[in-house]
Amino acid sequence: MDQIPTLKSAHPLGQVLAFKNSPDQLLARMEQLQSPVVKFRLAHLPCYYLTSPEAVHQVLVKDSQNYLKEGPFFKATKMVLGNGLAFSDGDIWKRDRRMLAPVFHKKCIDSFFGLMLDFANGLVNDLKTTQKTIDIHAVFNELAMNIATNTLFGTDLEKSKSDVLLTKFKIMVDDIMKRMSGLSFPLWVPTPANQRLKNAIKVYSEGMKQIIEDKVKNPGYTMLDLIIHAKDPETGELMKLQELIDQVRVFFAAGTETTANALTWTLYLLAKHPNIATKLRQEIDQVLQGEEPTLEKLSQLPYLHQVIQESMRLYSPVWILTRQNKEATTIAGYTLPPRSNVFFSAYMLHRNPLYWENPNDFIPERFTPGKLSKEALKAFIPFGAGPRKCIGDRFADMEIKVVLIRVLQSLHWQLKESFEVEKMFSGSLQPKNGMWMSFEPLKKHVAAV
């Protein structure tokens, strides 16, 4: 076997600082080695970066059972967010997937359409009366959190309780981002940050326990109700209390910040390309005839779908993924030892000129059905691929579409003058200093159903 091409570093921490400060530049340097597998070092950890869709396909699809969500990078996440569906492996993951698949069935997700539309209308009404430039990224984060909270718990949850939960959850997520850099103290070290995190985990878990116990006594029609009563079709078992708490944590983590980022980047791209925004509005006007969207009409808006796909190609919220192989494996002719830390990046795959023509340009038409090559389709992984593909992709897609439709029907927006967006490659891809925009109502009236 040929020796794996290596991006060498004389620094004691290897590529840790580059990975923390400018990960896109680090990955680009590894891409320049023109190898499907590149070796690099993060402190004492030997790591491997995959650059080709075929190599990534092997990890996510072909040999997915050999690649676990393990290693120091998932260890930090599991310590804070628990062992829910997005982080579990093996038999536990298979059981959780069996139990939760009905919860995320199309009929169940469709039942939340009206709730999403109500929140989208509330957002539009607020933006219509906003006279100042605002950070729309912060607004979308709050919107996604509110939708997730009401979807999970229903409208009967006291706002004071939900505010506490969301505050503590934000502390937990922010801490994960720091730990992913590898530069945080272990949790047993009594630093102020660690004490704050321990308190957040404790308060969040106790609050979730009370909510779940109340739900068992007073059932309703929320997603939490569905999860509580989900049975393993093979054993008939229900989830235990801690397992329920972990699943809710995962739903918040995967379903809020990523959706907010996708909405933010899409509005940014449409502000930069008013001709595409005009074309999209024309499709919406033609199909909806000035009415609010309905569940049935969402599938009749192909250009809207293409715009979202292209936005998620350029600014995939989940920009990097990692796995650890159980057994020694061969990828593209290179042998990786057991328990190797394997990285691959949707952001880099989505912008690779080998698979995308004019890869840095915003061209929604490239997603016209039948137009993409097989290589490009394999290189497009905004929700992952294979058996571990995000189970909530349908939920996210519907939420993004409903919000975008109502914003496009009702508002015109533009970036703050002289504002330059800077990307932040954290746990998700987001604007570093917010996304500052001004909004004003469109002159024509859109009727309410």
Image (tube, rainbow, N blue to C red):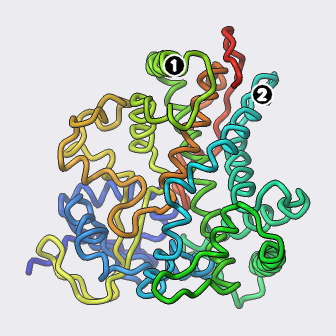
Q: Nearer the viewer, residue 280 or 351?
A: 280
**Vertical placement of residue 101 versus 267, above or below:** below
Q: Position of residue 196 (x, y in %)?
A: 80, 75
Q: Is residue 165 visible?
A: yes
**Vertical placement of residue 103 versus 316, above or below:** below
What mark, if any, has residue 439 been given in the picture? none
Residue on which disc 2 sits: 125
- Label 2 SS: helix
Q: Is residue 418 visible?
A: no
The C terminus sits in image quarter: top right
The N terminus sits in image quarter: bottom left
Q: Nearer the viewer, residue 237 or 131?
A: 237
Residue at the (31%, 36%) spot, across then down: 367
Q: Do the residues under discs 2 and 1 have CB atoms within 8 angstroms?
A: no
To which quarter of the image does residue 403 belong? top right
Q: Earlier in the sequence, mark 2 or mark 1?
A: 2
Residue on which disc 1 sits: 281
- Label 1 SS: helix
Q: Nearer the viewer, residue 38 or 327?
A: 327
Q: Position of residue 62 (x, y in %)?
A: 23, 71
**Vertical placement of residue 31 versus 136, above or below:** below
Q: In the image, is 175 to the left or to the right of 71?
A: right
**Extreme residue in the top direction:** 443
Kind of residue at disc 2: Asn
C-alpha separation, residue under disc 2 versus residue under disc 1: 19 Å
Q: Bin the neighbour count of mark 2 within 10 Å (Cα to Cα): few under 14, some 14-19, many 20 and up.
A: some
